[in-house]
Image (cartoon, coloured by chain):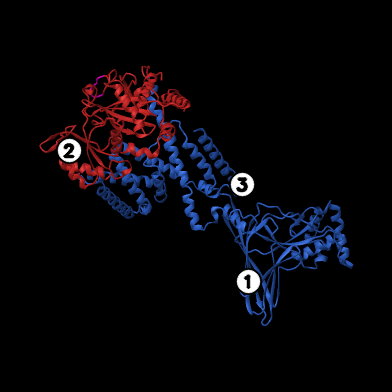
Amino acid sequence: MINLWKRWKALEARGIMGINRRNADYVLKYNKRSLYPIVDDKIITKQRAIEAGIHVPELYGIIETEKEIEKLEQIIGEHSDFVIKPAQGAGGDGIMVIADRFEGRYKTVSGKIVTHDELEHHISSILTGLYSLGGHRDRALIEYRVKPDPIFKSISYEGVPDIRIIVLMGYPVMAMLRLPTRQSSGKANLHQGAIGVGVDLATGITLRGTWLNNKIAKHPDTTNPVDGVQLPDWDGFMRLAAGCYELCGLGYIGVDMVLDETKGPLILELNARPGLNIQIANDCGLALRTHKIEAHLAELKERGLQETPAERVRFSQELFGHVPSAAI
Amino acid sequence: MRALNLHLKILIVLLVSVGVLVTAYQIFVLGIPVTEDETDDLWNIDARVEFQANPREPVKVQMFAPPLNQNYVSLNESFISNNYGVSVNQVDNNRRVTWSARRTSGKQTLYYRLALTKRYTGDLPKPKGPVFRDSIPLEGAEKIAAEALLAPIREHSADVETFIGETIKRVNNLNDDNVKLLTAGNTSTPNRVRIVELLLSFAHVPMERVHTLRLITDQAVSPELWIRSFNGEKWLYFNPDTGEQGLPADRLIWWTGDEPLISVDGGKQAKVSFTLNNSELNAIGLAKMTDQNTDADFLEYTLYGLPLETQQTYQIMIMIPIGVLVILVLRNLIGIQTLGTFTPVLIALAFRETQVGFGIILFTLITALGLSLRSYLEHLKLQMLPRLSVVLTFVVVLIAVISLLSHKLGLERGLSVSLFPMVILTMTIERLSITWEERGGGHAFKVALGTIIAASLAHLLMNIPELTYFIFTFPTVLLILVGFMLAMGRYRGYRLTELFRFKAFLKE
C-alpha cells in the first residue's frame, strides 16, 4: 500500500498523465464534442486537410452503399497498390493494404493473396459498420498506399511506420515513432504489439522506445537499435502537426503522419483521444510539458497575442528539444 | 475553469448536505428506524361477545374497551357487528363501546378487535387520582373483626404502599378468624378485594379495582382483577391474590372500577371471551401502522406511500445507482475495463434471477459458446448483421437447451433464466463479439472478465438487504451518492492499474 502511494507520488513528480487527467483536463476541456466528426471521419479530415493545403495520401474514391461496391474496379483503375479503409475506423482496424496485383487477384503487404470477392466482402463489412466506433453504418475509402521511406528498413517489420505528435492548442507536445512488429502483423498500433519510439522534438532524432508497456532499446524482430535514427524532414512533420489545430479546431489531438518516399510527410488521421503510451516511449510525462504550454498560452492571452504555426513549432522545439529525457 | 470548480463545489456541498440533513431528520426527528431488524411485537386481541337476545326488545350492549393512554398504543381498532350501531364514549378513565340494535332475536355474536403494540415514542399524561376516602360504615361483629385486623397492619406498615401490601397479606390468610368472619365463606378474589377495600377505607386509603388482560398467546385469557391506589405521584398496583406489587409489563389495563365488563339490556347469558395472537412486524411496517393513529404523517411522502407492488419494483430500481457507483469506482479509480458502462449493472440485475454463482457459470458458458459460433461463422464470410442474427438465435436456442437439460437433471435453477437475463446475455455477446472483431480475442477476454467481476460485485452490493432497506427508507441518501459521483467527475488522479502500467518509468 505504502509502496503504491510512493509510486503514485513518483509518477506525479515526473508529470505522468493518467487517463482521468487526460480526460478531465485536456480532452473534455479543449475538445468540443461537436468537432469530433472532423477527426472521427477520415473522409472529412481529408477534405479539410486538402482545403487547408495540408498533404494527405491521395484519395482514389469513396464507397458509400452496397450498390457502389460495383464501382470498386473503376476506382482502383490502373493502380496496382492501394489501401481500403473504414472512414470511421479506430485503432487501425479494418484497414486492408494491397501491395500488388497478381493474375486478377490481389496481394496484401503480408503476402496473402485475396480475390476480388474477398475485397468486396471486406468493403461490405466496412459499410455495415463493423469497424466503426459504436457500430454505425460507415463509408469505405480507397486511397494511395504510402511507401515508407527506406530509412525505416532497419528498424521496422513490414507495414508502414507512422509518426504521432501530440498537439495542444497547436503546440507540439511530444512525438513518437510507431514501428510495426511481427506481433502487430504490420500494424502500427501499440495495443497490437507495435513499438513506440520517442522522438526529440527539436532534432527529430529517435530516442529509446516502449513495447507492451516496457522500455526497450532494440527492435524485437530486426534487433537493430531503435534510438539515434535521424528522421528526415523533421521540421516538415512539426509544421504539419502544428497546422492541424487550425484544420480541426480541437485543442488536444494526436496527429498521425507518415513519411512517403516520394511525397514526404503526409497526414493520415487525427485522434481526439490520443493514448498515453507516448510517455513511456519518451520516458517523459506529458503533464509537465502541457503545463508549460498552458502557462505560455495564458501569457499570450494577457498580451492579446496569437502565434503562427511556425512560431508555435519554434516554441516547442526550444522548450522541449535537446533536453535529456528525464529533465522535462 | 475556477468558476466552474466553485460552482461544482457548491453543488456537491448542497447535494450532500440536503442528503445528510433530510436523512438525519428522518432518523432523529421522525424516529424512523435505521435497520429493518428492529421488530416489535404486534398484538391482536379479539373480544368475542355472545348473548341471547330477548325477542321484541331493543338491545343495548355495553362493554369496556382499553383506554389508549397507557404503555401500549393502539394501531387499529375495529367493531364487527351486523345491524348494530356502534359508538365509543369515555366514562371517567374508561372507554366504553356501545352496540345497539332496535330489533334482533336469537344468539348474537359481536366482535371487538384491537391491534396494539408497545409505545416507543410519545409521553403519557401525568396520572391523577384520589388520595382520601371516607370509611365504609360497619356494624357489630364485622366492625370488631375489621379493627382487630387493622391493628397489626398499622403496626407493620410505614406508608400507603406497605399498608396495602400488609392488608392483602392479612386478608389472604384465610385461617385467621377475623378474616373468616369477614369473608363469610366466600373466598373468591372479588370478595377478598371487597374486604381489602373495606379495611383500607378505615385508614382512609382510597382503592380502585383494575381489570387487566394478560398478553399471552395460546392460552384462554380472561380479565384479571388487580387493585391500585394513588400515592400522590403515581398509581401503585397490587395483585390481590399474591400481594405482588407493580403491574407486570405484559398486562394491559382493560377497564377500572367496580362495574362488570359487559352489560346487556334486552339480552341474557352475556359472555365475553378473548383470543390473543402475537405477530412480529418489522419496525417500518409498525411505524406505518402507528402513523395512521398518530398525527405525524411522516411516511406520507416516502416511497412507503406507494402501492405494495410498485414498492417492490422500486426496491430493485433504487439500488441501480449503487451498481452504477460500483462501476464508476471500478473503472475510474481502479481501472478495470468493462463492456460498456452499464452492461455490468444490467448483468448484475440479471443475476438477481439466476443467482450469482449459477449466473456466472451460465454467463461464461453461453458467452463462450456464442463467441465460438461467431468465430466459426467468420470463415463463411457473412455480412455482420446476418452473422450477429445467427449468433443471437443460437444463444436463445442454447439457453432453451440448457434450461431443458438442467430441468431433466433435476436442477430447477436452469429454469430461472427468464426473458430479462436472456436479453442481457444476447446483448453481451453482441457487444463482446464486436469488441473481439475490433480489438482481438485477448482484449475481449480481458473486458469480459472485467465485466463479470464488476457485475458480481455490483450484484453483491445491490442485494444487501440492510442497504436496500436503508436506501429505500432514506432515498435522499442518493443525493450524497450524486455528490460523490460529481466529485468523481473531476477526479484526475491515477487509476490503480495505471500505477502498474507506468511502472516502467520508475525502473532505471
Q: Which residues are magenta?
A: A220-224
Is A57 contained in the magenta span? Answer: no
Question: Which chain does the red colour mark?
Answer: A
* Residue that carries the numbered disc 1 in the rendered image: B110
* Residue that carries the numbered disc 3 in the rendered image: B25
N-terminal label among 3 and 1: 3
Q: Are marks 1 and 2 on the same chain?
A: no
Query: Residue B451 in the image: x percent, y percent?
Result: 38, 41
Q: Which chain hosts label 1?
A: B
Of the two numbered discs 2 and 3 in the rendering, the one whose residue sits closer to the viewer: 2
Q: Colour of chain B?
A: blue
Of residues B258 and B333, the one nearer the viewer is B333
Of residues A214 and A152, the one nearer the viewer is A152
- Where residue B98 sits, quadrant-wise, is bottom right
Q: Which chain hosts label 2?
A: A
Number of residues whose C-alpha sits closer than 10 Å to that of mark 3, classed few (under 14), some (14–19) or many (20 or more)? few
